[in-house]
Image (cartoon, grey):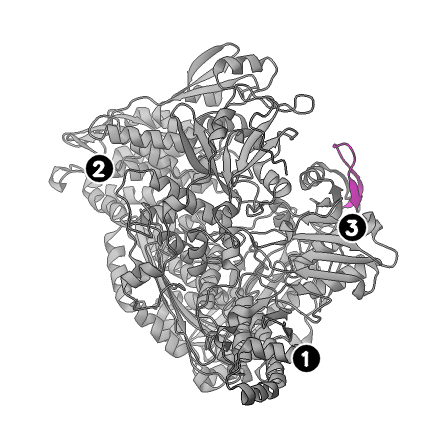
Amino acid sequence: MEVTQNPAPPDECLVFEVNGERFEVKDLDPSTTLLEFLRTRTRFKSVKLGCGEGGCGACIVLLSKYDPILKKVENFTVSSCLTLVCSINGCSITTSEGLGNSKDGFHPIHQRFAGFHASQCGFCTPGMCMSLFSSLANAQKTNRPQASPGFSKLTVSEAEKAIAGNLCRCTGYRPIADACKSFAVDVDLEDLGINSFWRKGDIKEVKVSRLPPYNEKDHPCLYAKELKDEYKSTRLLNSKKYSWYSPVNIEELQKLLHSNTVENAALSISKVISYLKEKSKANICASGYLVYTKIADHMEKIASGFIRNSASLGGNLVMAQKKYFPSDIATLLLAMGSSVSILTGHKPKKITIEKFLNRPPLDPKNVLLSVHIPFLEPARVDGSVNSRSTLLFESYHKKGILVNNIQLAFGAYGTKHATRAREVEEYLIGEILSVKVLDEAIKRVKGAVVSEEGTSHAAYRSSLAVGFLFEFLNSFSGIGSSEELNDSLLKGAAKSSNDINISQIGNNSLLLSAKQVVESSRDYHPVGEPMPKFGAAIQASGESVYVDDIPSPPDCLHGAFIYSTKPIARVKDISFKSTPQPAVICAKDIPREGENIGALTAFGAEPLFAEDLTRFAGDLIALVVADTQKNANLAAKTALLDYDTEDLDPPILTVEEAVKRSSFFEVPPFICPQEVGDFSKGMAEADHKILSAEIKLGSQYYFYMETQTALAVPDEDNCMVVYSSSQCPEFAHRVIARCLGVPEHNVRVLTRRVGGGFGGKAIRAMPVATACALAAHKLGRPVRIYLDRKTDMIIAGGRHPMKITYNVGFKSDGKITALHLNILINAGITADISPIMPNNMMGALKKYNWGALSFDIKVCKTNHSTKSAMRAPGEVQGSFIAEAIIEHVASSLSMEVDCVRTRNLHTYESLELFYGSVSGEPIEFTLPSIWDKVARSSKFDQRVETMQRFNHSNIWRKRGISRVPIVHEVLLRSAPGKVSILWDGSIVVEVGGIEVGQGLWTKVKQVTAYALGLIQCDGAEDLVKKVRVVQADTLSLVQGGFTAGSTTSESSCEAVRLCCNVLVERLLPLKEKLQGQMGSVKWNDLILQAHYANVNLAVNSFFVPDYSSIKYLNYGAAVSEVEVNILTGETRILRSDIVYDCGQSMNPAVDLGQIEGAFVQGLGFFMLEEYLTNSDGLVVADGTWTYKIPTIDTIPKQFNVEVLNSGHHKKRILSSKASGEPPLLLAASVHCATRAAIKEARKQLKTWGAVEGTDPIFQLDVPATMPVVKQLCGLDTVEKYLQSLRS
């Protein structure tokens, strides 16, 4: 760390501060990012590498910078992964550690994040905290009235928007929004969710008093006055090795151009937005107000705040011009008729933005100097400004809407640059809007907006252009009274434009409301209390240590994988452009005594590296090892592979091809699911049949915020210590030992916490840890790996894709009598856990009484990356297949789908038939009561009627609602535990289960306190504060097993309880003896005396579940309502209501977080996430630009959850039930509601005379993305609508 107090650094030196510590840096590669610097050259590790492309928010810091012109310090967030250290000279950086910490005291943000249960795995939390802190700091600068104590000037809407660009894969965002809103001046504390500060029923004054106090004056942004002097002209960094110049004016820039070096410091997009907003406020009654407002509003939709803060307007345009970047800004400015000034040679030149985009790409000596937005008149009709206009438009309203001027620009539709639709403009100018005119204009738009060959969703993009033009012009035609309108278009416009206006009410707030109903129990106190997650505060402050936060040992090297881009090929040679040549570890470097093994399951092993042939695109070929992670990544990225595919069989890339070539994995008989009833008899009883219907389901990527990572350190006596972000360290331990050819006692695997797993850190983490250990063993030096997001996405595998064909028979009343399924599961190249998929799928699909159920399921071996367990593996697909079949049956009978669902729900008798002994006692079958309860709490019947009225009165937006049940079977696993009591009475606990964000450690602490508290000493009620759960260590606690299947917390808790029971038994005689001598006995005194009396205060246990209770069923139901925009295909989730049976929850707050988080992750699978590959099977959706997980603005606008306490379950561990995976299945309710809305759109399309695309029976793909939804609603809806008006 380069820290010095020298007030006058040399000119060849960068000076800045981090959390108040001064840094003077003399030697630095100019390509070094702030993130890399903070993580490798300072002690501050709260900034995390999540994506490396500014798309996730995990690396956010607050940058404080002095503006010498305004003479004030500006504070704003930036992505440290995109910010170069050389660009922050004279700045101050604040990270989450700088706000507060466990030693000096946590910041109220940290405390409220912990108290509102807003941190699960915690990897994203420091970035969230910094986003909120920045918003608080900037709100304080406004001249709004001072907020009351404990609150800020921030509004609820601003608080929600503060974290709009931050991604979280665990929580579902709702608790994060609540933590942010707790600072808002206009918050209603009644609207905030479950927290650890107050109880339900507390009055407002009590609630305010219990919130961690906040006073902005106590938490200022850090900026040393001395830094103001660091703004110097043309600072030069280390000219002998590297060059970095910072010109401060055009003259200096021109001098630098002669050396081909350019650094352009243009105005940030955020500053442009602020300027436009100020301009619009100053001209609110004058011409130009609308233009500035519209541009600002649109720019706020671009990227996220922390990107807009550092991305410049000019930089965006240059990317569009040189790199063909699909720039919204370029499209917007093109419509405005803007121009730019560019410096070519020594003279600036002003050209239109249209010419700028179409000129040859700028070379290094060309500089974009300025952007000019012309002063424009707003659109006016009868003297009133139309605030709905989205494109430049001028009209007059006499006997109709006369178009006097219009400028149309379209971008991102599959061409290199945004373009003006001049032919359409020329046609419309001078025309009075009518059906005929609009119809012709749309034809011309379709001719103008033509995608280049190979563009994805080309027809959808063209349809969008039509929809945008129609919506824009339609908003004008809706002005004025209906008597004045002279055309059928205008007469229908009032209805078709009003529904758009009405639907947008309330859009200012991202998350409108949420309600949680939980029931705490004191039967096993403190078990049952909604305690904050253990470690949440240090996760928020960034002090929690993940694998990549462990300081690198001396002489540590870094690794990066070289993977195949071909499905089947020989690799003849690997060469590198970079010098010196990096070390390369491959299969031939495995010790003679070892094996080429990279992963292991009960179904076999898989190789670590490809040997003679690569087997799939993404197959690991070698590990490049270099002195830094950046150099290793660069070497791997630029490695040249010489492939040979001659005389090789073609790869198997589809399940159909796998069937042709009989390429399958065997499913052991003992895990094969059982068929139910007589299918032939059931079909014979049916009144109706559906034959050979098909469903196809795609994959899903884990998108854990922390990518795969490991650190291997050689130890004495040929031993290896490996730190791994793993859900199953025990199996990683075994694999590493076998690969190295050493006894297992020579290997030690340590896992403290995992930054998100979802199944992806189980089997798929093993090759990373093993490769790390192999490299360390070979080179005799520590080696660490932290995969970049692209590599992680390419090799991860993810969820199993599949193809389903079914035959179903049913009665006229909707009762299904028989179902047969043919399922082809794409398992990828190795078995992994794929053989359990048939059993998992059928377990979830059997939630309905199918009468008779038969199936033929094949697990296909293909030349794709290995598919592995992902949260609810098989269950989510099986549950969805059941819903798709129910929907199909309902459509075939023209029945309400909810009636068909209800008709086929299980009775307890049919449940026993389908699930056998797993069904439990009749009292445990809570699904019927849950089904009714969710209908009542969501007001399902009333909302169905309201929705029908909405759909009747709105043309361009349709709503759908759906109620979906789940039955989810889970399996308890064996688990070890160890409890030790130290001299001072504090307690150390070890468990085999891994803390991945699910609150396992928290529940273990609660159970430990409960079980030891049974000794009934004075002070035992505070035992939970004395418990610490420590990291998993495979040499300390063996047989740790897998953290998977939602039940590891239960098993770990029971293992710990067994330990505690033994300890209580050992301590009880001594306690009774002391009680006889002293009366009351304090816990600390008892333990001290026990040590002196040589009582063994360390106990190991191994919990093995009883066979009769090893499996059980979980129940839940959800109602979701969505709204679909027919013009765009956009789907908004208006509301979701969930009722879920947690048994007697060990921690209702933790379980609530699991329910919400799982549901939102399910939304991603059903609605958003496309894990696409190319024709070779290589993943192409390989980053945040191309793979979209849910964000705070895509979750339900109203999100209500009830955690049902279903009473005592004697066979359950402390009467609890699982919560981690089953609720994910409930997200299918959103998909089904979307289908209902599309059905309404197709019904309307039929009334307009359309034939194609109006069948009520259709298949809605998963995920139901905007292009998918739009296509099913009709790509030509506008044309059909206009035709209906003309006819």
Q: Is there any visible trace of residue 483 in the rendered image?
A: yes
* Camera-nearest label, 2 or 3: 3
> Looking at this rendering, what residue extends furthest in the front direction?
1077
Q: Is mark 3 on a helix, strand or loop?
A: helix
Range of residues picked out in magenta = 569-585
State the residue position of label 3: 776
What amino acid is found at the position of numbered circle 2 in the picture?
Ser
State the residue position of label 2: 477
The N terminus lies in which quarter of the figure? Answer: top right
Residue 1000 at what x, y percent from top left?
A: 55, 67
How far, Cα to Cα, is label 1 from label 2? Answer: 85 Å
State the residue position of label 1: 1096
Residue 525 at what x, y percent from top left?
A: 46, 77
Q: Quadrant of residue 480?
A: top left
Q: Give the side of residue 740 with respect to residue 932, left or right.
A: right
How far, Cα to Cα, is label 2 from label 3? Answer: 71 Å
Assess disc 2: are there few (<14), some (14-19) or many (≥20) residues with their C-alpha within 10 Å of its C-alpha: many
Q: Is mark 2 on a helix, strand or loop?
A: helix
Q: In which quarter of the image is residue 486?
A: top left
Q: Nearer the viewer, residue 24 or 649?
A: 24
Residue at the image position 60 percent from the left and 61 percent from the top: 759
Mark 1 and mark 2 residues within 8 Å of each other at the beta carbon? no
